[in-house]
Image (spheres, rainbow, N blue to C red):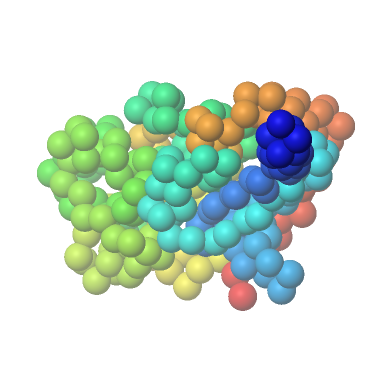
Amino acid sequence: MRHIILTFLLAASCAGASAGTAAPLSITTEHSPPSSMLGPDGVTGRETDKIREMMARTGTDYTIDLLPWKRAYMMAQKRGQTCVYSTSRTPEREALFKWVGPTDEAEWQFWGLADHEFPLKTIEDARKLRIGTYVGNASDDYLRSRGFNVDAVSNDSVNPQKLLLNRIDLWAVAMRTGPAPRQFGWSEKVVPLLVFNRVKVYLACNPAVPDELIDRLNAALAEMRRDGTMARLERKYDNWVPK
């Protein structure tokens, strides 16, 4: 009897210790400057700073890993206690995640050569054109499911060069709502032509992440909007230029 009681107490003690030590939240993202990028002290960027601030305000233990987008996205789908940003919230994805946000807004735009000769007034005008997309991106899924002629690559930075080489006619790219960037060598040659969708982006979490944590993160984000922190973190990158 004494042996049984000691065994029970030891098991209960171990279970309590295990329950009291929650695993860190594993957060994944992609290299997408200035939203998320590798800096001297780890992953940084405009959206990354917002995520870190939310974690700090809620006292959440976490890690952030910079990965190719498709891998980052699939990890959040398949692994408990894992989230991914910045993720477009679409009807097709709604049931796949628990959502924290929105942290930002984006436009899905068609970009092309400044001297292009084809008309482009609506998305239907792009149906017969060759469209460069990004593997695993929501805009790629959107166009592919609607029968557009897409040519997906694993690195989105390749698409402007493909335009310049006439290997595609359009580049489908998600851009933060606001003025188009003018920080790249191709900026005067490759230009925005049409906005074909608008989306909000989120921290998307695996369904196994507790509702209580999702609620606390959303509350922290709402507080960041109210106290001006969101605007301050966004202004920090107003004059960012690639190095």
| Residue at horizontal 54 percent and vertical 53 percent from the top | 29
Q: Residue at x 63, y 37 (%)?
A: 103
Q: Quadrant of the C terminus?
A: bottom right
Looking at the picture, tell me which residue is in the foreground, 83 or 12.
Answer: 12
Determine the residue located farthest toward the left in the rendered image: 128
Q: Residue at x 65, y 62 (%)?
A: 43
Front one among 232 and 110: 232
Taking the image as shown, residue 190 lies to the left or right of residue 141, namely right
Instruction: Give me the residue at 42% from left, 30% from top.
Output: 96
Pick whichever, 136 or 216, lies toward us.
216
| Direction from residue 65 to residue 228 in the image, left or right | right
Residue 190 image offset from top left, x and y in percent: 38, 61
Residue 197: image x %, image y %?
39, 32
**Count of marks placed on residues:** 0
- Assign the N terminus to one quadrant of the image: top right
107 over 47 or under it: above or below: above
Q: Report x, y in % for residue 229.
A: 82, 40
Q: Residue lying farthest right?
A: 227
Kindly indicate the quadrant of the structure image that contains residue 17.
top right
* Closer-to-camera residue (119/170): 170
x then y, percent, for residue 214: 65, 29
Residue 227 seen: yes
Is residue 176 among the parts visible in the rendering?
Answer: no
Q: Quadrant of residue 119?
A: top left
